[in-house]
Image (tube, helix red, strand yellow):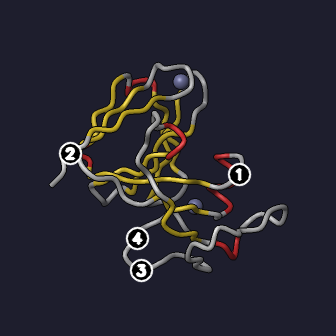
Amino acid sequence: MSDTMHSGSCLCGTVRFKTRGPLRGVIYCHCSQCRRQSGHHYASTNVPDDRLEVEGDDNVAWFASSDDAQRGFCKTCGSVLFWKHRKLDYTSINAGAFDNPTGLHGAMHIFVADKGDYYEITDGLPKHERSASGIVVAGD
Ligand SMILES: [Zn+2]
Ligand SMILES: [Zn+2]
């Protein structure tokens, strides 16, 4: 197991985080919840909770976007940071919050059936109409 560290923060810097170990490939979620919250589509990796350290976490506001999932953002600057399923012990982290070099790579698109009508997906990565097996998302 690699002990690679990654770090990142919200825009104002009040919330900082560190992750340890490998990060999942970035999943682009085009569902309407992700589009509304992020302003475009979501792009997130994830880590097991025991490999995530958050500094300033009392400045993270959590919005329950469904019965099963909540979305964490900075109370001060509004940066979209985390997505968390209540029953799972890992946390999705927005790829845009990581410091460079992130070492991250795109993996796939999900919920493309719900994508906005003002853009096309042309990067050649796998596309799933809704969710894909083996991953858990906010979906409805
Ligand atoms: Zn902030
Ligand atoms: Zn989504």
Q: Position of residue 67 (x, y in %)?
A: 47, 60
- The N terminus appears in which quarter of the rendering? bottom left
Which residue is most to the right?
118
**Residue tagged 1:** 40
Measured Cα–Cα span from mark 1 to mark 4: 21 Å
Q: Earlier in the sequence, mark 4 or mark 2?
A: 2
Residue 88 figure quarter: bottom left
The residue type indicated by label 4 comes to Ile
Q: CA distance from mark 3 to mark 4?
A: 6 Å
Q: Amino acid at mark 2?
A: Asp
Above or below 97: residue 121 = below
Q: Quadrant of the C terminus?
A: bottom right
**Answer yes or no: do the residues labelled 3 and 4 have beta carbons within 8 Å?**
yes
The numbered mark at residue 135 is 4
Q: Earlier in the sequence, mark 3 or mark 2?
A: 2
Question: How many C-alpha atoms fall within 10 Å of the one at disc 1: few (<14), some, or many (≥20)?
Answer: some
Relative height, residue 8 to residue 47 (above, below): above
Q: Image height check: is 114 above or below 89?
A: below
Q: Which residue is mark 2?
A: 50
- The residue labelled by disc 3 is 133
Q: Between marks 1 and 3, how big is the CA–CA gap?
A: 24 Å
Residue type (three-letter) at the residue carrying disc 3: Ser
